[in-house]
Image (spheres, rainbow, N blue to C red):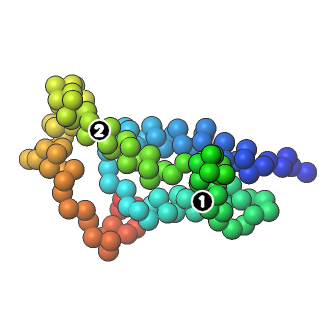
């Protein structure tokens, strides 16, 4: 037989192995990610967390520990934080090499204009290959 891994251990695996990799991507590549993508990722993560026994979504898993939860992180919140960090860099470090590279890559516009641009409608870019 296989080794049985608890729900707590599975949440810790997500935090250590998955969250750090996504955070690296979020901080390295500034792109719009639709909410549907985060919902799909959350569904996959919940399926992993409840591989044995649970089967359903337990709202306590994403609660903070002092509220009786397991503090499973929200990838969407981490994406928002990484995006906010990028904007902070534009404001406080306008002469940094990274900001200058981003400005050079925004042909005909600025990072600020792109950040404030209208988002695509939900009917556009619905296929993951188009994200």
Decide if residue 45 is in sight here: yes
Q: Earlier in the sequence, mark 2 or mark 1?
A: 1
Q: Nearer the viewer, residue 127 or 59?
A: 59
In front: label 2 or label 1:
2
- Whether residue 73 is situated above or below residue 101 in the rendered picture: below
Label of residue 86 in the image? 2
Q: Give residue 98's quadrant in the image.
A: top left
- Whether residue 102 is situated above or below residue 14 in the rendered picture: above
Residue drawn at x 16%, y 45% as measured from the top left: 112
Residue drawn at x 66%, y 42% as measured from the top left: 12
Element at label 2: helix
- Whether residue 39 is situated above or below residue 49 in the rendered picture: below
Disc 1 packing (10 Å; few <14; some 14–19; many ≥20): few
**Residue tagged 1:** 44
Residue drawn at x 21%, y 35% as measured from the top left: 90
Q: Position of residue 62 (x, y in %)?
A: 59, 54
Relative to residue 4, is residue 28 drawn left or right?
left
Residue drawn at x 53%, y 58% as measured from the top left: 41
Element at label 1: helix
Decide if residue 128 is in sight here: no
Label of residue 15 in the image? none
- Whether residue 34 is situated above or below residue 114 in the rendered picture: below
Cα separation between marks 2 and 1:
28 Å
Q: Give residue 106's quadrant in the image.
A: top left
């Amino acid at each position: 037989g296989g080794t049985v891994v608890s729900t707590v251990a599975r949440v810790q695996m997500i935090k250590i192995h998955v969250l750090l990799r996504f955070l690296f991507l979020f901080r390295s590549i500034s792109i719009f990610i639709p909410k549907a993508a985060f919902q799909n990722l959350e569904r996959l993560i919940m399926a992993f967390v409840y591989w044995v026994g649970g089967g359903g979504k337990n709202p306590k898993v994403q609660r903070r520990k002092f509220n009786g939860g397991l503090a499973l992180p929200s990838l969407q919140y981490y994406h928002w934080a990484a995006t906010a960090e990028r904007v902070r860099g534009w404001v406080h470090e306008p002469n940094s090499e990274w900001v200058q590279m981003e400005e050079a890559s925004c042909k005909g516009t600025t990072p600020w204009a792109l950040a404030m641009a209208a988002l695509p409608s939900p009917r556009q870019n619905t296929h993951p290959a188009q994200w």
